[in-house]
């Protein structure tokens, strides 16, 4: 057997939408070739994101029933605080309704105009929150991370030389904190090694700069450390997590990923004075400190999810499933980013569709072809998301990579679903020469990919 069987059986089922090719063609046309505009009820396998899309366990649903909806001091908050302290080890635990609010709270209370925040690679919302608070977000990931085919066991690592250069150029007094995203989503869901975390901490100590983790996929990162660093082969996931977080001063977390819930997040810090400022802001924008934008029942589900995600049988299956999809595609020659990450497979659209030029949006054309072929929804990470006009010359600037991300929700799809996805992608690959580019007909001034409308160039 290539990878473990599902370490759970099914108690509740949800039927999967089915559509005909004819119907899907019409849906694409009506949606302006933008997969964000397609109703989920018309998607057969939804790989748009792994965020908030997890299936909860029977135990979590049972937890929902013991939600204590008291405004202040809900018992679920104390359970949540205890769980987070045990895994993450930080003193102050602030619940939020999702990750980006934790980011907003952290940056609005620490940044002054012109401050610099380094990271391996900032996720979009992290970058946006830094910039919104008048800071500059700088990526310091190792060069290998930017090569689609470079084989490196920890492709999410921070490049310490780049980081030191950023610190020396900006001045340590203008860097209120450094972030580290585990796993590194925008670099393909790639892990960061324990050695790299330790070395980053050591470097930051020389300059007295705090280290915060963007911990969304921390359990997946721990699993990679266990599998790829022989020094950790005999350790359990919880102790690896505790060690990681012991090198930091706090973290932001979107529990919609490794918290195994549909909504939830939090912020942690060891800094008493900062915790006070954050709590005051929390009351202003989210809610009272013992619920932070969530219901008591949500806090309970999150506490239970954070424990379940540490189960090694679960992680073996979860990451094994993503890797199995990646290997099934490599076996039939489909170009993907390697090695496969923890939560998603990224198709390399430039190689998949070499005849479609950047201004005809090859990755978006590929994402639409997957939908047309089998009702699969991925997300374009390429020219539609990141292409823009040079403010000086007015010329088009296209990103280096044209990709389609297929993010796998946690505990939702079975091996047969993965086989289906692999088969559809193979079929699209076989008929790749018949795929045409797209023309942009409407774009919003910012974040255009969410609402853009396009037209097929095949008449
Ligand atoms: N940080 C990382 C690394 C993320 O991947 C995300 C969300 C966030 C922060 C923000 O968390 O959505 O709860 O506010 N990533 C999702 C994705 C949206 O599809 O990759 P949020």
Image: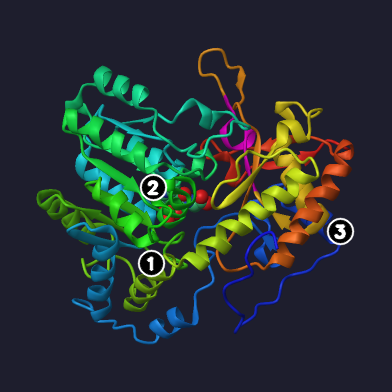
Quarter the N terminus occupies: bottom right
The response on whether ligand 1 sits within 8 Å of label 1 is no
**Residue 308 highlighted magenta (yes or no):** no
Q: Which residues are magenta?
A: 379-388
Q: Is 2 displayed left or right of 432 in the figure?
A: left
Which residue occupies the foreground of this view, 282 or 174? 174
What residue is drawn where x is 23% and y is 70%? 82
Q: Is 427 displayed left or right of 193 in the figure?
A: right
Q: Which disc, if any, is residue 21?
A: 3
- Residue 353: image quadrant is top right
User: Relative to 3, does residue 152 appear above or below in the rendering?
Assistant: above
The response on whether ligand 1 sits within 8 Å of label 3 is no
Indicate the secondary structure of the residue bearing disc 1. helix
Residue bearing the label numbered 1: 306
Residue bearing the label numbered 2: 231
Indicate the secondary structure of the residue bearing disc 3. helix
């Amino acid at each position: 057997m290539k990878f473990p069987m599902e370490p759970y059986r099914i108690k509740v089922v949800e039927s999967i939408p089915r559509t005909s090719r004819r119907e899907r063609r019409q849906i694409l046309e009506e949606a302006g070739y933008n997969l964000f505009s397609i109703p989920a009820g018309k998607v057969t396998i939804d790989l748009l994101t792994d965020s908030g899309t997890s299936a909860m366990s029977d135990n979590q649903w049972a937890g929902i029933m013991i939600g204590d909806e008291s405004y202040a001091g809900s018992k679920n908050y104390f359970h949540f605080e205890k769980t987070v302290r045990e895994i993450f080890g930080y003193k102050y635990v602030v619940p939020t309704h999702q990750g980006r609010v934790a980011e907003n709270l952290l940056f609005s209370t620490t940044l002054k105009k012109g401050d610099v925040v380094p990271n391996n690679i900032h996720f979009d919302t992290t970058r946006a929150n830094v910039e919104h608070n008048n800071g500059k977000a700088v990526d310091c990931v190792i060069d290998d991370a930017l090569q689609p085919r470079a084989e490196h066991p920890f492709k999410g690592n921070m490049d310490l030389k780049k980081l030191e250069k950023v610190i020396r150029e900006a001045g340590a007094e203008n860097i209120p904190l450094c972030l580290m995203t585990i796993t590194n989503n925008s670099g393909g869901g790639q892990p960061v090694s324990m050695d790299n975390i330790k070395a980053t901490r050591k470097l930051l100590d020389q300059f007295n700069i705090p280290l915060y983790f963007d911990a969304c996929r921390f359990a997946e990162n721990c699993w990679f450390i266990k599998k790829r660093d022989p020094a950790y082969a005999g350790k359990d996931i919880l102790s690896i997590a505790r060690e990681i977080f012991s090198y930091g001063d706090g973290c932001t977390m979107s529990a919609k990923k490794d918290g195994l819930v549909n909504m939830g997040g939090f912020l942690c810090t060891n800094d008493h004075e900062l915790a006070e400022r954050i709590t005051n802001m929390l009351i202003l924008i989210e809610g009272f400190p013992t619920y932070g934008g969530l219901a008591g029942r949500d806090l309970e589900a999150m506490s239970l999810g954070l424990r379940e995600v540490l189960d090694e049988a679960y992680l073996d299956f979860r990451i094994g499933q993503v890797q199995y999809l990646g290997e099934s595609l490599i076996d039939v020659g489909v170009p993907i980013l390697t090695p496969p990450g923890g939560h998603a497979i990224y198709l390399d659209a430039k190689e998949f569709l070499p005849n479609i030029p950047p201004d005809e949006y090859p990755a978006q054309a590929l994402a639409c072809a997957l939908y047309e072929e089998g009702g699969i929804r991925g997300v374009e990470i390429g020219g539609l998301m990141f292409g823009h006009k040079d403010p000086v010359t007015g010329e088009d600037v296209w990103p280096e990579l044209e990709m389609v991300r297929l993010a796998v929700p946690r505990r939702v799809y079975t091996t047969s679903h993965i086989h289906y996805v692999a088969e559809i992608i193979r079929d699209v690959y076989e008929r790749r020469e018949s795929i045409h580019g797209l023309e942009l007909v409407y774009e919003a001034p910012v974040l255009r990919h969410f609402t853009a409308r396009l037209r097929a160039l095949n008449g």
